Amino acid sequence: MIEPRKLRTDAENIVEMLIKRGYEEKEARDLVNEAVQWDQKRRNLQVEVDTIRSRINRISSDIAVLKRKGEDATQLIRESQKLGNNLKKLEENLRKAEEKFREALLSIPNIPHSSVPEGQSSEDNPVYRAWGKKPEPDFQPLQHDEIGEKLGILDFKRGAKIASSGFTVCWGAGALLERALINFMLDLHVKEHGYTEVLPTFLVNRDSMTGTGQLPKFGEDMYHIPEDNLYLIPTAEVPVTNLHRDEILDEETLPRKYVAYSPCFRREAGSYGAHTRGLIRQHQFNKVELVKFTRPEDSYQELETLLEDAEDVLKRLGLHYRVVTLCTGDLGFSAAKTYDIEVYLPSRDEYLEISSVSNFEDYQARRAMIRCRAGRNKPRYLHTLNGSGLAIGRTVVAILDNYQQKDGSVKIPDALIPYMNGIEVLEPAR
RNA sequence: GGAGAGGUGGCCGAGUGGUCGAAGGCGACCGCCUGCUAAGCGGUUUCCCGCCAAAAGCGGGACGUGGGUUCGAAUCCCACCCUCUCCGCCA
């Protein structure tokens, strides 16, 4: 949610921002005008309602005085009743205007940071930096799903049988590999990067989904349990960011850095295609997520270190990757700035997104009412950031793709060996 | 799931229709006092919205949430949510 005051004073800049994000000029203008108008209306109504209320309050206390003295108050009571009649209608209008205003405000995306490059689509995302070199195997590597099936560690057929397509079962060393990656990443972020481990709930309520921005706009992407009105989380970002919903944190305790493992559930309605084979786009996958709560003035510095913390995982796994800065046209709805980390897949000679690291500034904090305070100063909205550190399924994809050998076996990266119960190589099943 | 109790400020806790945003206490903060610490004394201490460029100031709202009754609701009524205790069930 953007700052309401910016709407009043900076409407033209917001329209320009929307255009940079890829909105048609008319669409952008309408969106902003809608919000501005409801804001005006709501403020006018507020003044009216407050004035009447103020009168009624005064009369009420006069009535109290009369009654205590045992005198007659019918005159005042009648007057107050008359005022109250108008009030109901006005209050109803005010409530409506506020709702419309909020709706309009929620449909305006975050303002990109000044350092975000302009562009139309992912084609225009500049490479921020890269690490490692493209491996050059002397054979044609297989794609991860083929290797996974040959090794007997990934079972797509049975995933579909017991659940539905888009679900996968891991067997034996494959299951162990997922677990090893989760533990490796959690340990790294806790012991070396100073994050506090959180094991959140995997179901959350409506307020939480609204707080981080999944609702109301993206409801159809989530699994919902109507009997209890709970949602399966699409990412640990939701429960972890909402930990501090409606709280005011002492600035002394910032930044707060949390790391959480969770499975992630996404309906992925209508997103099947060439790049979704195997583990790449699943209805359920594991992820280790990093979340930060920071003071406003620190958030961009914290974004850089958050990015570095995520990159460190790939470095230790010895996987070549690059970091791209999302351009204005590709930036997510609530983000002010996002870096994607893309890991290299030799089998396709392509880069695959494995982490997305974002600064939301106060956009989520406003929705979720997460604030901070220095000493006795007034509370202010803090900044939230998050990033995958990393997506486990896609890390398995990258390992199978990069570490496979000519004979069909797959080496385990050195950093993972301590977590693999003595397994150093995945051998094909017989 | 059944029965009962209860949800009030950072915390504890009073308050059952009329200056109650809320007594009292604890904590915190600021002064004073004091070799230091503790104690003591005095004061301060919720948040949201609006008017205003902003501050000050003023007005409105919030006692789990949403409705209702009333001139007036923390207090009465209804629904929902949550917590606790006991029973049942169970990893």
Image: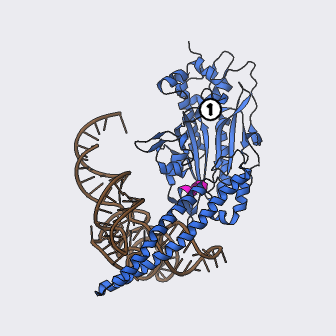
Please indicate whether residue A27 sits to the left or right of residue B57 in the image: right
A363 part of magenta stretch: yes
- Chain B colour in the picture: brown
A226 part of magenta stretch: no
* Magenta residue span: A361-367
Find residue A293 and report its horizontal and vertical position in percent: 58, 54
Colour mapping:
by chain
Q: Secondary structure at mark 1?
A: helix
Is residue A142 visible in this depiction of the protein? yes
- From this view, report whether residue B69 is shown above or below residue B87: below
Give the residue drawn at x 69%, y 32%: A319
The answer to which quarter of the image holds residue B71 is bottom left
Number of residues whose C-alpha sits closer than 10 Å to that of mark 1, classed few (under 14), some (14–19) or many (20 or more): many
Disc 1: host chain: A
Query: Which residue was labeled with disc 1?
Result: A395
Q: Nearer the viewer, residue A70 or B41?
A: A70
Find residue A76 and report its horizontal and vertical position in percent: 37, 83
Please indicate whether residue A229 sits to the left or right of residue A185 in the image: left
